[in-house]
Amino acid sequence: MFATGETNLQPVKTVGIISAVGDQMTVAKGGLSGLDNSSRSVPIGSWGLDDLIVQRATAALSGRFQVKAVTYNRAAFATVKESVVTPVNLVRSDPFKTLVKTEVSPQGLDAYIVITKAKANIARSGRKVEGVGFITYSTLMGSHSQIYALYEIRVIDGKTFDVIEKMTAPPLDDAGPERLAGPSRSVEESVSIGAGDDESVHKAVVDLIVRSLPTTLNDMHLAVAF
């Protein structure tokens, strides 16, 4: 019988939390023809999203675990790129296992909670978006704009470095056919993204994270049920 994630978590007492959702936001456009597809990156390091995620995760997990402060190479975790070839992804070792072993201090905790960027398809277009961003795309039904904060959570055993559990944060509500498969919300197409200093966009991203993180952690049996 295979052990479930909840069973594997039973001996875990001490955990460290690592967040590397990144300090960049992608602003992209997509269309049916593909001719108007474009994207650019906007720096949002001043938003402190990873610090926020660690703080919120610590609050959610402290009722069950002893959460220990850890230091880590955030850039190394934020820049991991998974292979687009699915069989390779299935066969090769999870790259985050090695990073936890080599880029995190202190070692020896029972488990490490690793929160990183996730990907989602754009409305049956074949294109993907990742991490934090703003996307405007055209469909047969018109034009749609969404802001999103896509992330996934791994629980990595601090002794064996095996992945105990892994989950991608789900949508906050029932996602329609044009919604991304992750925390996102529709916004007015007229919203303009400048140099990462748009306070309304900042607040929207924070809201997505704050509302989705406790639920996702609870679904993974990491947080005390609320």
Image (cartoon, rainbow, N blue to C red):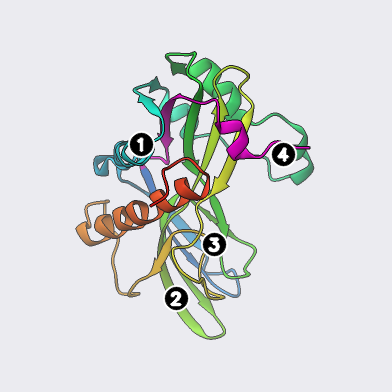
Q: Is residue 87 above or below residue 209?
A: above
Q: Is residue 136 above or below residue 157?
A: below
Q: Secondary structure at mark 4?
A: helix
Badge nearest the viewer, 2 or 3: 3
How far apart are the two marked residues, 2 and 3, measured between alpha carbons? 15 Å
- Read off the residue under disc 3: 181
- Read off the residue under disc 2: 144
Q: Earlier in the sequence, mark 1 or mark 3?
A: 1
Q: Residues within 10 Å of mark 1 (few under 14, many from 20)?
A: few
The answer to the question of whether label 1 and label 4 lie on touching residues, with beta carbons closer than 8 A, is no
How far apart are the two marked residues, 2 and 4, measured between alpha carbons? 32 Å
Which residue corresponds to the image point at 55% horizontal and 17% vertical from the top-left? Answer: 101
Q: Earlier in the sequence, mark 2 or mark 3?
A: 2
The image's mark for residue 63 is 1
Left or right for 112, reference 198:
right
How far apart are the two marked residues, 3 and 4, measured between alpha carbons? 20 Å
Which residue corresponds to the image point at 59% horizontal and 26% vertical from the top-left? Answer: 97
Asked if residue 77 is among those painted magenta in the image, a careful observer would answer no
Q: Earlier in the sequence, mark 2 or mark 1?
A: 1
Q: Is residue 190 above or below residue 69?
A: below
The disc labelled 1 sits on which kind of residue?
Answer: Gly
